[in-house]
Image: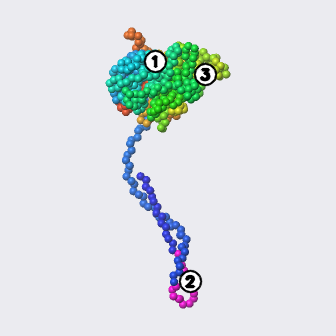
Amino acid sequence: MATATWKLACQMACIATLVFTGCTGDRGPQGADGPPGTQGPDGSDGANGNDGNDGANGDDGADGADGADGVTAIALRLLGRYESGIFDQGASEIVSYDPATTQLFQVNANSGALDVLSLVDPAAPTLLSSIDVAAAIADNTDITTVLGAVNSVDVRGGVVAAVIAADSGDERGAIAFFRAADHAFLAGYELGFGPDSLAFSPDGDTVIVANEGEPLDDYTVDPPGSVSVIDLSVGVAAATIRDLDFTAFDAGGTRAGELDPAVRIFGIKQPGDVPSTVSEDIEPEYVAFAPDGATAFVSLQENNAIAVIEVAAPRIARIFPAGATDHGRIGNELDPSDRDRGIEIRNWPVSGLRLPDSIATYDYQGRTLLVTANEGDTRDYGGFSEEERIRDLVLDPEAFPDAAALQSDAQIGRLLTTSSAGDDDGDGDFDRLFAIGSRSFSIYTADGAPIFDSGNQFELITAFRLEDHFNASNDDNEGDSRSDAKGCEPEALTVGRVRNAMFAFIGLERTGGIMVYNISNPHSPRFVQYVNDRNFAEEPSLGDTDGDGVEESNPAAGDLGPESIRFIPAADSPNGSALLIVGNEVSGTTTVYAIDIVPE
């Protein structure tokens, strides 16, 4: 404890002395006192006194709480795996965990149901049961639509929510709620067209659903995309639903002027090549709440945009474009061809539309930041397709004077692109070229300002690690086979805090494996680890060995096609340590990783 020293200043009064002078002669009697004299001027200040002694030190304060050890790096370690044995049928897709029951709920697209796994021992996940969501809705509600397979699941506060699409894309889907403890049906409600993703708010009082509204294959019908905001504050059985559509952004709508031209609106309905409206064209894909629950973000993948949703009084606050990665700039190189005889990661005059799939949020110094996995996706239907190879386009001779060489298979001629963008002047040739997906992950502010993009890092890291199997697909081991399309395809994404550091986990759908980055500083994320438990020496499939029409996965091949990732913090974990759960749709495996802290 610091001591303070006080100095005492003393002022002294000065007395004036009067001197009287008498005449020569006898001294007369004493005269009367004269009047008081005037006060003389103040004397100069006296010298400061000596410093006082230091005061005694106070008692020591109480010890503060122990600070968390610094963490800059972690390492994923394979801990356990559940194997469905089903190859390339989506037997393990979206996963969600309930800490109270140590159960994992996962989408099984092969059966159309929710599988329930026990994680009591995370090293040995076991199948407990399955929930037939379509049957539960049919048996317990007035919904008569023929429903298909479950698309997504989330769990919060002991309640499981699952969304399921209709068998036909031009009919509405539904949501069902179950009690996690005993899987009892709680309630079911009709939603918009093609519900594809959902998320609970942090407090569990709200569920938001992305209703994708994909067109029919012949493109004669393009249902409107929408966002359902479900209020559960008075209980699941008394939920209220607000369906937010995008009609205000249609031509002539009250908010048409707010739509950024960079948001892709390009669908063409049949017959007659009639452009879809904005509200029909927008396709909500994935949902993530802000940490405070006040807003939510919805990726509009095919539109290359993000919608921001206000939750308390539900409304679409804004839509911002996700942008593109310029592969002509240093740091953004890629390999654009499967016919270039190997790994050729270079700069090319192409930009990669990010077209984000999974998204996540985290708090940075009191601000919400958004993280995106930039997989890329196209519209490729029987009635309309935007997909083209660059070799099949007519390039503007001024923009691309070397077009003949550039469009060869060995350069960028094989690269998949979109015909919906790049003809800037409308003269029929392409002034710019856009690849599908950017093979990266990005970080944005809540207003859509880009902070970071990983550029060429996934290409370089996987090339170094996988060598001959660089850019292989998830159902065969041939290297370079996806270079002409979307490369490694970063699709799955989650974030999680380990002690005092924030990490992003990005799953690569095609080549497989998980990228780990420390994003504690969003302006300079740091690569931590790439873990891939795929065995390229083994064939992914054993074939249809039992004659049931479904191929069996080869267990020796490892994990293929990560579709979703779930971070389990140590406080919720069955073993007291942070875990990462991955649903792999091609191998049909559900994988548990331990998250080990790497000593500094």
Residue extending furthest left?
182
Taking the spot 38% from the left edge, 20% from the top edge, the residue there is: 141
**Does 429 sit left or right of 122 as displayed?**
right
Taking the spot 36% from the left edge, 32% from the top edge, the residue there is: 576
Q: Is residue 212 visible?
A: yes
- Which residues are drawn in magenta? 16-31
SS at circle 1: loop
Q: Reading the chain from its start, which is encountered first: label 3 or label 2?
A: 2
**Does 434 sit left or right of 558 as displayed?**
right
SS at circle 2: loop
Query: Mark 3: which amino acid?
Result: Gly
According to the image, label 1 marks what residue?
171
Q: Reading the chain from its start, which is encountered first: label 1 or label 2?
A: 2
Per the rendering, the mark at residue 21 is 2
Magenta stretch contains residue 43? no
Placement of the C terminus among the 4 image quadrants: top left
According to the image, label 3 marks what residue?
422
Q: Report the predominant secondary structure element of the magenta stretch.
A: loop
Residue 425 percent location from the top left of the image: 65, 22
